[in-house]
Image (spheres, rainbow, N blue to C red):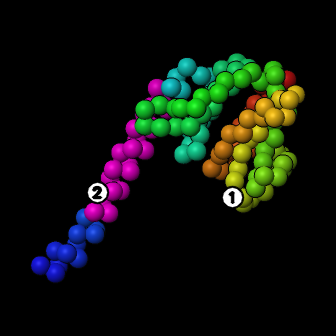
Amino acid sequence: MERGLLWLPLLVAFFWLAWQGSKEYQKIEAYRTWAQQFEKAKYDIYSVLGQKGSQITCGKPTPKGPVKLETFSLLDVQQIRLLVDDKSVDLGNPPQKGRTIELEFVFPDPSQSVRVPFTEIPLAAEWGKYLQTVTT
């Protein structure tokens, strides 16, 4: 009886991990369907981003598909900045570490800036460089 009670938490943990894995798989499949309409797209646990011509669409991934979608034109963007820990850094020479990583799209009205979170600094820097080439 005692052995059975000792294994119970492990069994619960196993089912919880399987459920979490299933949810993440559903997010990825929903993203895959959504991303087909774009020339280039990215997915990570914080956000989705799609680029088609000069149009950018970003949002938050969910198992039912991306939500809180925002679409804007790169032609309206004044500047693209890489923010690491809320500080602007050079896209060509980003730092190795940081807690919060975001790509910020700055419009002529600074209150309208859009921030897209990333999990990795090199990935955010590459997207920043690529999107800067699209705008020119």
**In this rendering, is residue 41 above or below 121?**
above
Q: Position of residue 76 (x, y in %)?
A: 81, 22
Q: Secondary structure at mark 1?
A: loop
Quadrant placement of the N terminus? bottom left
- The residue that label 1 is drawn on is 99
Q: Residues within 10 Å of mark 1 (few under 14, many from 20)?
A: few
Q: Is residue 70 magenta?
A: no
Q: Residue at x 81, y 20 (%)?
A: 75
Q: Is residue 108 left or right of residue 15?
A: right
Q: Position of residue 42 (x, y in %)?
A: 60, 35
Magenta highlight: main SS: helix
Q: Residue at x 40, y 38 (%)?
A: 26
Q: Amino acid at mark 2?
A: Phe
Counting the numbered discs, the total is 2
Q: Residue at x 86, y 29 (%)?
A: 109
Q: Residue at x 68, y 39 (%)?
A: 116
Find residue 15 and name its label: 2
Q: Amino acid at mark 1?
A: Arg
Examine the rendering and report whether any part of residue 106 can be seen.
no
- Gap between marks 2 and 1, in whole Å? 30 Å
Q: Is residue 51 left or right of residue 26?
A: right
Q: Is residue 74 left or right of residue 108?
A: left
Q: Is residue 18 left or right of residue 60?
A: left
Q: Position of residue 93 (x, y in %)?
A: 83, 51
The image quadrant that residue 96 belongs to is bottom right
Q: Which residues are magenta?
A: 12-33
Tell me whether circle 2 and circle 1 mark residues in contact (CB < 8 Å): no
Q: Is residue 31 magenta?
A: yes
Q: Position of residue 108 (x, y in %)?
A: 87, 28
